Image (cartoon, helix red, strand yellow):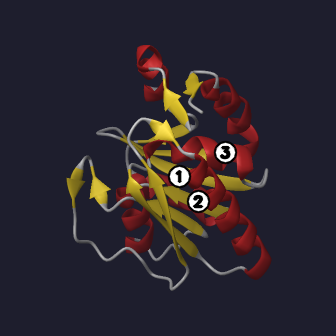
Amino acid sequence: MFKLNEDLIGEFKKPLGELYADFEDAIPMIKEADFLISVGDQTTKNLLDNDLVPDLGIIDNRIQRKDHDYDIIRTENILNADNPAGTITENLWETIEQAISLTLEDSENRIIVVKGEEDLAVLPCLLIAPEDAVILYGQPNEGVVFVNVSEGKDKATKLMTYFIKIV
C-alpha cells in the first residue's frame, strides 16, 4: 500500500492536465478519445448526462465527501476495490490493471466501485492506461481536468515519489 505523505498534499491540488471550468467546453475533446477513463462520481455523472459513456469509470458513491443516489452505473461489468482515503492500495492498483486489460480485450465498459476513496486512482490510471487514453477527473470547486495519458505519465511518476510505501 502507498500512503500519501501529508506534508506534500499541496502538490496534488495542481491539475495534471487541462482544467475546464465548464464541463461542456471539454466535450469536443472528450468525444475524440479512443479510450476514456473517468475518475469520480460527478465526472462520471457529467459524462452520462451528455450521453458519453467512459470505457472505465471509477467511483466511490460520494461527491465531495457526501453520499449521493445518482444512477451512474450503466454496465453489468462491475469490479470492486478497497482503498482508504489518502492511499493507493495494491487492491485498487490490481483492479485498475484488470479493468483496463479486460476492457481493451472485449471493448465492454466497466465500473470500479471503490469502498473508501477513489481520488488518487488517477495516478495508477496514468501509469497503467494505454498512451492514447484520456483521463477525466474533477478538480473540486474548479471544474474537470482532461489529461492525455501520454502527457500525464511523467507527472504521475513524480507524484508517486510523494507516497510512503507501507508493507
| Closer mark to the observer between disc 3 and disc 1 | 3
Mark 3 nearby-residue class (10 Å; few <14, some 14–19, many ≥20): many
Picture residue at 40% right of the left edge, 45% below the top: 84
Q: Amino acid at mark 2?
A: Ile
Picture residue at 31% right of the left edge, 77% below the top: 71
Q: Locate the N terminus by quadrant.
A: top right
Residue 104: percent from the left, percent from the top? Answer: 76, 71
Mark earlier in primary sequence (3, 1): 3
Residue 48: percent from the left, percent from the top? Answer: 42, 73
Q: Which residue ends up furthest to the top in the rendered image?
A: 7
Measure how far apart labels 1 and 2 are at the Cα level.
Answer: 6 Å
Mark 2 nearby-residue class (10 Å; few <14, some 14–19, many ≥20): many
Identify the residue under disc 2.
37
Identify the residue under disc 1.
136
Q: Which residue ends up furthest to the bottom in the rendered image?
A: 76
Q: Which residue ends up furthest to the front in the rendered image?
A: 167
Measure how far apart labels 2 and 3 are at the Cα level.
Answer: 10 Å
Picture residue at 45% right of the left edge, 81% below the top: 74
Identify the residue under disc 3.
126
